[in-house]
Image (cartoon, rainbow, N blue to C red):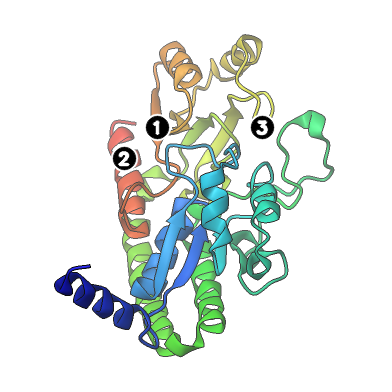
Amino acid sequence: MKPYLKLIALLLLLIVSKPGFARLNVFACEPEWAALAKALGGDNLHIVRATTAQQDPHHIQARPSLIAKIRRADMIACTGAELEIGWLPLLLRKSSNAKIRPGALGYFMATEQVSLLDKPTSVDRSLGDIHAAGNPHIQFDPYRISKVAKAMTTRLIKLDPSHKNEYKKKGKQFLAHWQKSIQQWEKAIQPLHGKTFVAHHQGWSYLSQWLELKQIAVLEPKPGVPPTSSHLSEILAKVSDNPPDFIIYAGYQSDKAARWLANKTGKKAIAIPFSVSNDETLTQWYNGFIHLLLWEAHDL
């Protein structure tokens, strides 16, 4: 090896072996928790995402690449409430990583930090993808995001106490900024209060509660079951005399059923990004879908 290459290698070795340099490895199941972890942990964390905003988090393949990533994790940050039931347990089992198994300090589920809506009175798989603990799609409620942020900050401190002061500082900064943003959003979204909508999937309960919207129908006959022509005809008959103000579907979902109903009712079908895209922050994502809703609904 040439002398200058040896010098570079030595410098790199000194840097990575420097006390306090090692970063906490965080495996985020969904982009929203990756974005939150980045806001709270900054350069102290190395974060990898299992999914993107263009994927259905219910249905992900437990690929070897994901197993390799989760095997190195010190902490997982996932939604929970059985959202990842089809793939996360397999990843955990294949990884043999005791630090992130259920009950371990590195096992962090966002839905365990808050109360959930839509808790079923009974669980029957014949009814579709029913979540026994309740609706897991809490990312659309900024107040629940605040609670998850507080819990995640506490967890990061326990996992990495050497950076306690930095986590505390970033946690306070995030919450202060987030609360200010909530105040701005709630002032902006007032024109949406009382509007009605039809959803593609039962994934908008937290958004409709926060925006004071009223969901009047769901395009899926059962949660997770694609819309059928007979079910769509039933919905059309139901809303023909009093059509919704708009139709909502996630950006990763097929727009076929939503567009069909939009054409039949003369109302708009709006594709809302279901999570953070690329290097967006949570604030940028909220700004985006709120502005989208306001723009699409400006003539209602």
Residue closest to the eye, 212 or 11? 11
Gap between marks 1 and 3 measured at Cα: 18 Å
* Sequence-wise first label, 1 or 3: 3
Q: What residue is rendered at 19% in x and 70% in y?
A: 5
Question: On screen, 122 above or below 162?
Answer: above
- State the image coordinates of residue 228 (x, y, percent, origin top left): 62, 14
Q: Amino acid at mark 1?
A: Ala
Which of marks 2 and 1 precedes in the sequence?
A: 1
Query: In the rendered view, would you say 261 is above or below 61?
Result: above
Q: Is residue 197 visible?
A: yes
Q: Position of residue 77 (x, y in %)?
A: 55, 62
Total numbered labels placed on residues in the image: 3
Residue 223 disc label: 3
Residue where numbered disc 1 is placed = 271
Q: Report, in whole angstroms, how far the alpha carbon at label 1 lies from the one at label 2.
A: 9 Å
Report whether 169 appears left or right of 73.
left
| Label at residue 292 | 2
Foreground mark, 3 or 2, reads: 3
Secondary structure type for disc 1: strand
Q: Residue type at mark 3: give it.
A: Pro
